[in-house]
Amino acid sequence: MTTILGTVVLLVMVFGGYMLAGGKFDIIIKALPFEMMMIGGAAVGAFLASNSMHDVKHTLGGLGKVLKGGRFHKQDYTDILSLLYFLVRLAQTKGPMALEPHIEKPEDSAAFQKFPRIAADRHAVMMICDYLRMVGMNADDPHQIEDVMGRELKKVKEEEMHASHALQSVADALPALGIVAAVLGVIKTMASIDQPPAVLGKMIGGALVGTFLGVFLAYGIVGPMATRLKGVVDEEARYYDVIKAVIVAHLHGNAPQVAVETGRKLVPTGYMPSFQELEQSLQDLVIG
């Protein structure tokens, strides 16, 4: 929502100020389709040339995050902490082998099915199951597990960040592409140097639309989109950091309540459930 609001404010302030200053839109409107074709087309071509098809699809998918924001909200964090509490408590009271029905076939697990949004998150499910399975295989050195989890989360975050980097590369290229379009406009103008000043003025104005458009798109549209996408990826990464924190705290021998509280402290402040809210959720947790 803030992305849309910011874009509307941007357009109103820029073009509204231009209009109030006495600017005329006829030159911009006449030149815009051709300048957009050159600048936008060149940007798309450079984007395709510098990325694999997988990265292209990944970046296009990331555009949805720019508008919708992060996937995880307060209830999602409450749910993941509740699920982890159930699993680590089960492992502590009945032993790691008691987790097998849940981690070997999570799609049939009553614990995972209690939380459909978690069950639908393939990465979260695999992360929980894989590392709790390693515990059952006597790989219970908390420092080793923490190191492996940290490297996996770093890898996943770097992969998710590629879409933001790709958009930022396009934003960095747009001003130069705008100059290319403007130079072509100047070349066109010089070929008509015998025309009267009124005609040449409009042609030069049309050429300058290219410079304007390149800078405007770079710093007003694509650049902020790249920054917003980076922020969303950073925000979503905290969700998986919470999973890591709870599992590592459990491996250090902490009680389930302490392990979950360790994870709660890593939840982004705006989405963090209070101690009382989480405690109530854990008390209400019933898994058949």
Image (cartoon, grey):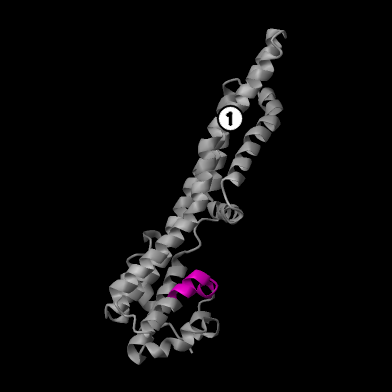
> As drawn, is 265 to the left or to the right of 60?
left
Q: Relative to 80, does residue 186 appear above or below in the rendering?
A: above
For label 1, the crowd category at 10 Å Cα-Cα, with few meaning under 14, some 14 to 19 and many 20 or more, is many
Which residue lies most toward the left here?
A: 253
Q: Relative to 105, does residue 72 appear above or below in the rendering?
A: above
Residue drawn at (38%, 84%), measured in percent from left and top? 137
Q: Which residue corresponds to mark 1?
A: 178
Query: Which x, y percent locates residue 196?
Result: 71, 7
- Residue 236 visible, this orientation: no
15 and 245: which one is in front?
A: 245
Q: Quadrant of residue 184?
A: top right
Residue drawn at (45%, 52%), measured in percent from left and top? 231
Query: Which x, y percent locates residue 195?
Result: 72, 9
Q: Quadrant of residue 10?
A: top right
Magenta residues (range): 117-128
Residue drawn at (67%, 16%), measured in percent from left and top? 189
Q: Secondary structure at mark 1?
A: helix
- Residue 178 visible, this orientation: yes
191 and 226: which one is in front?
A: 191
Callout 1 amino acid:
Gly
Q: Relative to 282, does residue 225 appear above or below in the rendering?
A: above
Q: How many marks?
A: 1
Query: Which x, y percent locates residue 96?
Result: 37, 87
Looking at the magenta stretch, what is its main secondary structure?
helix
281 and 262: which one is in front?
A: 262
Q: Quadrant of residue 136?
A: bottom left
Does residue 161 show up magenta in the picture? no
